[in-house]
Amino acid sequence: MGNPNTTNAAATPDFQALSDLGFSVFILPRGKKVPNMPWKAFQSKRPTEQQVQDWQGAGAEANVAIVTGAISDLFVLDVDSPEAQALLDEMNLPKTPTVRTAKGRHYLFRNPPFELRNKVRLKGVELDVRGEGGYIVGPGSQHPTGFIYHWEVTPDDCDFAALPSEVLDLLQQDASPTGVVTQTGRTKYLEAGKYSFWFNRQVTEQLTALRDAKDGARNDTLFRVAVQLANHSAALELDWATVAATLRPAALAVGLSGGEIDATLQSAWDRGQQSPTEWLVVARQWLYVATPDRFWSPSANQELKPEAFSRQFAELKPHETGKLANFLTGAGLIDKVLDFRFEPSQPRGVITHKGERFFNTYKDPGIEAVEGDWTPLTEFLEYLVPDKFERDHLIQMIAWTVRNPGQKLSYALLLQSKEHGVGKSTLIDIWRSLLGFENTRMTNSEEMDSPYQSYLENTLLVALEELNLGSGIAVYNRLKALITSPTAVINVKYRPQREVPNYANFVFLSNLEAPIFIEQNDRRFFVIDTPAERRSSDYWNDFYKWWQANLGIVKAYFDQIAFVDFEPKGHPPMTPAKERLMQQSETPLVQNLRELLEDMPFPLREVCTLDDIRQALKKKGMRWETPKRLIAALKSLDCQPLGQSRVSIGKASLWALQRASYWESASDEAKREAYEGIITEPPELEGAA
């Protein structure tokens, strides 16, 4: 075997010496790192002796490239910075041939018995690896800066070391999880998603144990190592035939016969299926959520702090030391996400948003539309809301939310009745089922009135069973914000306040005559007052069983609804129930003013002053009202200020109580005549307090 360059004085590459080491090499231009010839073929076939001799003759005109991976039985750590060198120094690597480079070193190791491909910037530093599909510039080559690559530790000084477990751990931590366990059909490398590095290490260790088995114990050793791998394979849902195929050649090599190997491997698989490696099962069932620093089980909807997680599964620890939580997160053997996110437009599971991994908690209800007789549903809807106009709009509201999950209506439903037990809650249960119960929330007035608004998170529909939040404009304005805002600030105990998307539509149920104050020009509530009366328990039992068993038919009914004059982002239509609620929402001042405007008693007239209005209110027994409140009340009734005008008693601020648009454009003289022409009582009464 030729001797590679051993001194810093070597100025040219030794192609023959590197080829004699078993490396697949090819030529590069002098002072360059990029080939000017196709080189992919050298990943599967070494150059011919003639090619090596020709390149050797190029001498000072050439650089040499060494193909990494299985063809050369070579895996290289490429150190390009002091930070990267410090990281490797902490690992206490075994002695192995090393090449000095312009920026650092190449550490050359034997290729592991499974495929490792190229990676860059491990741990965020300038530490790259070159494996399958890669190459390095070899000793004797010239860097573009003029530096000559040279051996620091030669192959004569030591053998090529096996890739240490610390490096495998580092690669495993840097691996990007795939989330799905698959097999790729490769002969040496078993693909197992984020468990690939770890699992292939187990395979390597078990193959070593099998090769080292003594005569007379080889079949027992095969069974023992195969059971361990079968346990892991069952937990990871791998194809056992592919795993067994990696054990069979090694078993044949130690002298076992084909028949006994196959029988032993089958027995091992039978055992492994009965006892999957428990900690791997747990690792696949849980994920780590970084922001709240919690482990979470999607199937059980259970959340544990890291310490509690390690205690919960203390008996299931793998042979590695330390707490299970630290082992799984540090080794990359559990799914990691930044936080939870609710995205109805995407499937449940891990998603990427703005470059970060989140767990999407939305769960598709999975209801398939089925043809059938939906008469029981339509009969129920007609019974609950007999008015066709109101019923059609309600049905369109439900259909639109079901067919557009994640889209908000710009208004809420308020469904009232005079008594309990008429089916309001049944309607909500049907609605929630179509959206997916997991994606909806029943709440109460106490929770909605609290500072914690977790009911808004991960929610397509919020239903309040009995609206009783008190009266007043403050409550109304708070509900308006919840109904319309695209985001919501969530306050949850033990977690920082945060802003999340607000996908919630709202339904309020009530048996009260006036459960909430609403503005006279309200645009946020569609109000229905159902006249339905109680039905027998037999009817409700039968109907409940029907719709529970026929959600596909119910879904088909709402899928065929046409949206006629329906504007989800517009204003809700007016209903008699809403008109009554608006009147009941009026303050005593507005109510009295409304009556006065209908009767127009002296001293009121189409054009008058605030003093005239106060005098009329006083006659009705109303106490003094501040100008601010009086003006607001007048404007709510479409009365308009006309500004100051000169009248017989001097200047006066006039108001139009009727025909406001006419008087706003009228002349000052017309306004004065309207004000003064109707006075029929002594002037001294006009200014009475």
Image (cartoon, helix red, strand yellow):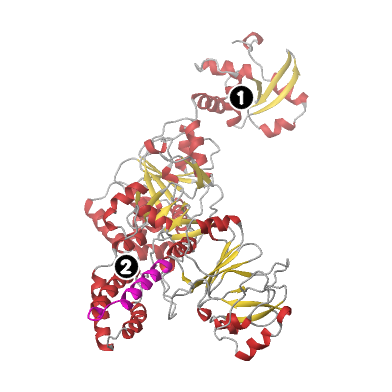
Is residue 431 in view from this perspective? no
Left or right position of 651 against 173? right
Q: Is residue 632 above or below residue 293?
A: above
Q: Magenta stretch containing residue 133, yes or no?
A: no
Q: Is residue 95 above or below residue 422?
A: below
Find residue 313 and report its image quarter.
bottom left
Category of crowding for the residue at label 2, using alpha-carbon neighbours closer than 10 angstroms: few (below 14), some (14–19), many (at least 20): many
- Quarter holding the C terminus is top right
Residue segment shown in magenta: 196-218
Q: Which residue is mark 1?
A: 631
Q: Is residue 324 above or below residue 52?
A: above
Kind of residue at badge 2: Ala
User: Residue 581 placed where, x, y %?
Assistant: 46, 36
- Which residue is nearer to you in this view: 29 or 40? 29
Secondary structure of residue under mark 1: helix
Is residue 17 in view from this perspective? yes
Q: Is residue 381 above or below residue 110?
A: above
User: Residue 430 placed where, x, y %?
Assistant: 36, 55
Find residue 268 and report its image quarter.
bottom left
Q: Which residue is mark 2?
A: 235
User: Residue 388 placed where, x, y %?
Assistant: 44, 53
Q: Residue furthest top?
A: 684
Pointer 1 with pointer 2, Cβ within 8 A: no
